[in-house]
Image (tube, grey):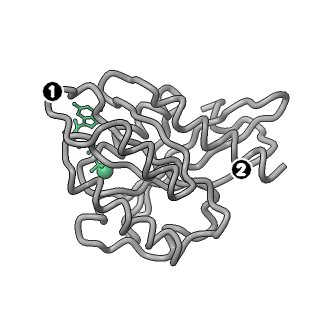
């Protein structure tokens, strides 16, 4: 696969975190799309996909890690976070508990993650407006108070998915280059 083998100027790792069933895996498969190559390390319960992104004249290969369902058992280990420069912290706008748990995920990020990790708070399932339990303003306020970027997405309708990942990737690029 040529996209995968293409020379890149930078390679970096980012992680997906958030409660079970908020849509992490669907967001990743949307983003990775045609350049999708899912790989897994069953022993530690992670999967990851690559996507090349062009910024200016540089090619950045983003390696995005997904949990393979380990979050259900709160069994995500420090190796998941090791070396990650960015994270998408995802909640489901139709389930308030997943929003309340954002604080727990932030705590875990602070414990295991890089201190200067770029974090985007993502309110997913924006297509389900009629079942919304968390307003966009609440999401934005939380992000602001925690120093995170913020975006609402729909993996189902492919709304803002590209934007959320690219926000993270371009910011990491700014910091590291
Ligand atoms: P994960 O456990 O966080 O990886 O969540 P999944 O990606 O497996 O998605 C959990 C469920 O939510 C699945 O039934 C998906 O089809 C559904 N889902 C994911 N994203 C969206 C979305 O943006 N809108 C809607 N309506 N459903 C979604
Ligand atoms: Mg998943």
Quarter occupied by residue 104:
bottom left
Tell me the element at label 2: strand
Q: Are marks 1 and 2 in contact (CB under 8 Å)?
A: no
In the image, is residue 3 above or below residue 171? above
Q: As drawn, which residue projects farthest toward the left?
A: 131
Residue at the disc numbered 1 = 130
Quarter occupied by residue 105:
bottom left
Picture residue at 42% right of the left edge, 31% below the top: 30
Crowding around mark 2 (Cα neighbors within 10 Å: few <14, some 14 to 19, many 20+) is few
Picture residue at 48% right of the left edge, 33% below the top: 31
Q: Is mark 1 within 8 Å of ligand 1?
A: no
Residue 150 horizontal/vertical position (percent): 49, 42
Crowding around mark 1 (Cα neighbors within 10 Å: few <14, some 14 to 19, many 20+) is few
In the image, is residue 101 above or below residue 161? below
Q: CA distance from mark 1 to mark 2?
A: 40 Å
Picture residue at 21% right of the left edge, 56% below the top: 97
In the image, is residue 88 above or below residue 83? above
Picture residue at 35% right of the left edge, 31% below the top: 155
Image quarter in which the N terminus is found = top right
Foreground residue, 90 or 143?
143
Tell me the element at label 1: helix
Instruction: Tell me the mark number nearer the camera, choosing from 1 and 2.
Output: 1
In the image, is residue 39 above or below residue 27? below
Residue 89 horizontal/vertical position (percent): 43, 53
Q: Earlier in the sequence, mark 1 or mark 2?
A: 2
Residue at the disc numbered 2 = 11
Marking on residue 73: none
Foreground residue, 70 or 92?
92
Residue 124 horizontal/vertical position (percent): 33, 38
Residue 163 horizontal/vertical position (percent): 54, 30
Foreground residue, 1 or 14?
14
């Amino acid at each position: 696969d040529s996209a995968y083998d293409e020379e890149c100027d930078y390679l970096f790792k980012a992680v997906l975190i958030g409660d079970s069933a908020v849509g992490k895996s669907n967001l990743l498969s949307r983003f990775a799309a045609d350049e999708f190559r899912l790989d897994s390390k069953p022993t530690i319960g992670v999967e990851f996909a690559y996507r090349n992104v062009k910024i200016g004249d540089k090619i950045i290969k983003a390696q995005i890690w997904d949990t393979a369902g380990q979050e259900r058992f709160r069994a995500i280990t420090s190796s998941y976070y090791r070396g990650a420069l960015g994270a998408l912290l995802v909640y489901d706008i139709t389930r308030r508990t997943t929003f309340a748990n954002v604080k727990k995920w932030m705590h875990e990020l602070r414990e295991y993650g890089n201190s200067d990790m770029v974090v985007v708070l993502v309110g997913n399932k924006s297509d389900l407006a009629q079942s919304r339990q968390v307003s966009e303003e609440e999401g934005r306020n939380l992000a602001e108070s925690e120093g995170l970027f913020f975006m609402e997405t729909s993996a189902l309708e492919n709304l803002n998915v590209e934007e959320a990942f690219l926000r993270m990737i371009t910011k990491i690029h700014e910091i590291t280059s």
